[in-house]
Amino acid sequence: MKIAVLPGDGIGPEIVTQALRVLAVLQSDGLKVELEEAPLGGAAYDQFGAPYPDFTQKVCRAADAVLLGAVGGPQYDNLDRPLRPERGLLGIRKDLGLFANLRPAVLFPELANASTLKPEVVSGLDIMIVRELTGDIYFGEPRGMRTNKDGVREALNTMIYTEPEVRRIAHVAFGIARKRSQKLCSVDKANVLETTEFWKEIVIDVAKDYPDVQLTHMYVDNAAMQLVRNPKQFDVIVTGNIFGDILSDEASMLTGSIGMLASASLNETKKGLYEPAHGSAPDIAGKNLANPLATILSLAMMLRYTFEDEAAAGRIEAAVKKVLAAGFRTADIFEPGMTKVSCSDMGSQVVAAM
Ligand code: IPM
Ligand code: MG
């Protein structure tokens, strides 16, 4: 198995280093993987003049899985749009066909007080957000900024889904719901937007193949509200790219810190890109303060979904639980009485727990 390693920008290199230390434990116990590193985002722009250069594309296409840190930084904000780090991320998602983005929001019982919501609202929380990742307003054409025929400046993006795009993500979501608690909530804005009315219709049709799964629908504004009112009513949520982007950030905060949230982005053949759901946090980059657990948990997802090695995935997750139970906390999840640790110390604790 080959893993492409893309540290990216900001805190990316620090958190990826810790995940690789965890991987090294598995390697020393016999896991056979080859690693190849490549730049993405701003780091790639600095080295190759493009956020997803040919070199990186080659490495990623040849790999079975990709481990990514994060991309972006203020020094790149004034570049032309196609050169910006975020375009590197969108480029790799599209290039590898990574249409299914799985974002679990799981509350570790040890962190019930780290959430801004009351412990009784979030304790036991375990939601899986299935976000479509290669369509919708993120990629729809036409797009851009222009001056119209009346000489007035305007800008537009296009929200569009094809039927096959909706079908395949619906199948992924129903498949996951079937293995969990047989409950799936499809989130749309069908009262206003044709694109999502169409989405809803197709999800209802796909549901015929999954009579054992109970399908419900919710408008996205209500879903945003229900997520903070009573998040435990949800098990699996499926939604489009833009709604999923927003709701997954919201859901992550239920768990105490976005620094805990892992993600997997899969194509049709189980090839996947694994990355923390948080960003590059330029304000704390290089200070050894970042929380590496989301990246370490993303590595666990890689073992589960691409390598189908449930034992190794479980071993990493158990180690993370143990470290939290022992009271080790990075700054983002720190509470009085706990032991505050740096990014690299947190990595050491997970390695030791394994
Ligand atoms: C995410 C991020 C990205 C997105 C950005 C960095 C392009 O917010 O992965 O959720 O919008 O998809
Ligand atoms: Mg986002």
Image (cartoon, rainbow, N blue to C red):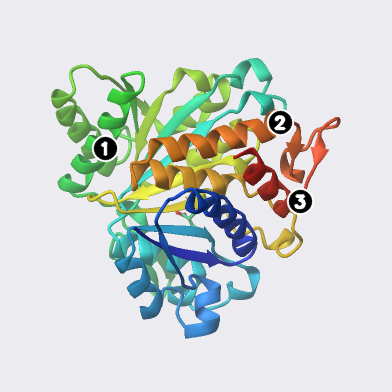
Give the distance between the C-alpha atoms of the residues marked 3 and 2, in whole angstroms. 18 Å
Q: Residue at x 16, y 31 (%)?
A: 206
**Can I make out residue 301 in this image?**
yes
| Local SS, label 3 | loop
- Placement of the C terminus among the 4 image quadrants: top right
Residue sitting nearer the eye, 86 or 162:
86
SS at mark 1 in the image: helix
Which quadrant would residue 149 be assigned to in this image?
Answer: bottom left
Disc assigned to residue 342: 3
User: Which amino acid does the dot numbered 1 rest on?
Assistant: Val
Q: Is residue 106 left or right of residue 112?
A: left
Residue 287 in percent (x, y) is at 76, 61
Question: Residue 83, how many percent across, how many down?
Answer: 47, 77
Q: How many C-alpha atoms fall within 10 Å of the one at disc 2: few (<14), some, or many (≥20)? A: some
The residues bearing labels 3 and 1 have C-alpha atoms spaced at a distance of 37 Å
Q: Which mark is residue 320?
A: none
Mark toward the viewer: 3 or 1: 3
Q: Are marks 3 and 2 in contact (CB under 8 Å)?
A: no
Which mark is in front, 3 or 2? 3
Pointer 3 or 1: first along the chain = 1
Q: Please name the residue that numbered disc 1 is placed on.
A: 172
Cα separation, mark 1 vs mark 2, equals 31 Å
Q: Earlier in the sequence, mark 1 or mark 2?
A: 2
How many residues crowd mark 3 within 10 Å: few (<14), some (14–19), many (20+)? some
**Residue found 52% across the figure and 83% down from its top:** 47
SS state under label 2: loop
**Amino acid type, mark 2:** Ala
Residue sticking out furthest to the right? 337
Q: Which mark is residue 114?
A: 2
Looking at numbered disc 3 in the image, what kind of residue is underneath it? Answer: Ser
